[in-house]
Amino acid sequence: MREITYKQAIQEALREEMRRDERVFLMGEDIGVYGGAFGVTLGFLEEFGKDRVRDTPISELGIVGAAAGAALLGMRPVVEIMFMDFTTLALDQLANQAAKMRFMFGGKARVPMVLRAPQGAGTGAAAQHSQSLEALFVHFPGLKVAMPSTPADAKGLLKAAIRDDNPVVFIEHKLLYNRKGPVPEGEHVVPLGQADVKRPGRDLTIIAVSGMVPKALAAAETLAGEGIEAEVVDPRSLPPLDEGTILDSVRRTGRVLITHEACRTGGVGAEILARIVEGGFDCLDAPIRRVAGRDLPIPYSKDLERQVIPQEEDLVQAARRLVGKG
C-alpha cells in the first residue's frame, strides 16, 4: 500500500469531499493564498476558487458563527482554526449554538460542519499555541470529537466528519503532520465511534490518544523486548467513544494504562477510566494508571516542554509498575 504523510492524507480527504459534494467549502484565516498555518490547504484556492476557499477576518467567533449559519442552510463548511488554543474565542457559537441546534429543533435543524484545528506541544510554541483541549469539547453534548493518530485515520475520519450531519471538532496533532503511513487509495472512510487496536497484546492495555499513540507504540516495542506484551488501543473519537472495544481489551489483559498529552486533571483519561470502572471493574487485576501532561501551561523552553508532556520512557516505567516489574 502507498505511504503518504498525515498532512497529505488530510489534503486528500478535503479534495475528494469537495469534488464529491459542491456544498463542501472551506473557511479560515490565511487558508487561501498562504495555505493555512501548516500548509494543509495550499493549492486549494487555485483548484476550487475563492467562493469555496474563503479567507476570513481574524475573528474566530465570526468564522464559526458564519459556518454554523451556512450549515443550518444546507451547506457543509469545513472551518480551519489556526491553533486549537484560539477555539476558546469561538466557544459561544460552537458550544451554545452549533452543538445545541439539532436538539432544540427536534432534529429538524442540522449543523453539518467540521472545525479543524492543530493542537499539541513539541514545537516550542509556548503556552498560548500548544494546548491540548479535547476535554473541553467532549463536555458539550451535541459535539463529536475526532482525534486521528495515523494518516489512514486522518483521511478516513475527516471524510466521515464532513459527511456527518452534526458538528465535529477534528483535532490534528502538529507533530503528526509529517509522519508517513499506509493509506488505502480510493474511497476510505473510518466511522466515528470506532476504536482501533493498533497493536495486540496480553499483559496490559495502553489506551492512547492522538499524538500519544506513536509514543505508546514505541513504548510497547521496548516492553516487548522485556517480555511484556502491551496492547495499544486508539479510541480515535471521543465522543462517540467506543466503549466496547476498550472493555474487550481490558477483559483480555486485566491491566490498564491511559495516556494523553492534555493536563491530567479533568482530562479525557479520567472519563475513560470511569467508563472502565463502571463497565469492567471485575476484570481489573490492578489499579488503572494515567500518564498525562502536568497541570502547567506549556513552557517555551524545549527542555522544560519535554518535562511537562508525557514521553515514551514515562509510559515504559508506568507499564513496568503495572505488571509488577518496575
Image: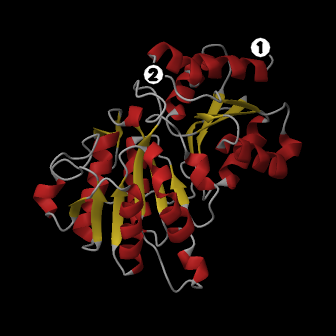
Q: On the rendered structure, is 102 left or right of 158? A: right
Q: Which quarter of the rendered picture does the N terminus lie within?
A: top left
Secondary structure under the numbered disc 1 in the rendered image: loop
Q: Is residue 202 visible?
A: no
Tell me residue 312's x, y (percent): 56, 20
Q: Position of residue 61 (x, y in %)?
A: 42, 60
Q: Give the residue type at disc 1.
A: Lys
Of residues 137 and 76, which is closer to you in this image? 137
Q: Residue at x 28, y 61 (%)?
A: 26
Q: Can you give x and y, in whole percent of width and height, for residue 209 in the image?
A: 56, 40
Q: Quick one: which residue is furthest to the left in this view?
A: 46
| Residue 239, x across and y down, in percent | 60, 57
Q: Nearer the viewer, residue 268 or 207?
A: 268
Q: On the image, which quarter does residue 21 sit in?
A: bottom left
Q: Is residue 314 above or below residue 284?
A: above
Of marks 1 and 2, which one's residue comes earlier in the chain? 2
> Disc 1 or disc 2, which is closer to the eye?
2
Q: Tell me, for residue 300, which label it has, or none.
A: 2
Give me the disc on residue 23: none
Q: Residues within 10 Å of mark 2 (few under 14, many from 20)?
A: some
Q: Taking 67 as reference, is 132 left or right?
A: right
* SS label for mark 2: loop
Separation of residues labelled 1 and 2 (CA atoms):
35 Å
**Left or right placement of residue 158 versus residue 211 in this view:** left
The residue at which mark 1 appears reads as 325
Q: Quadrant of the C terminus?
A: top right
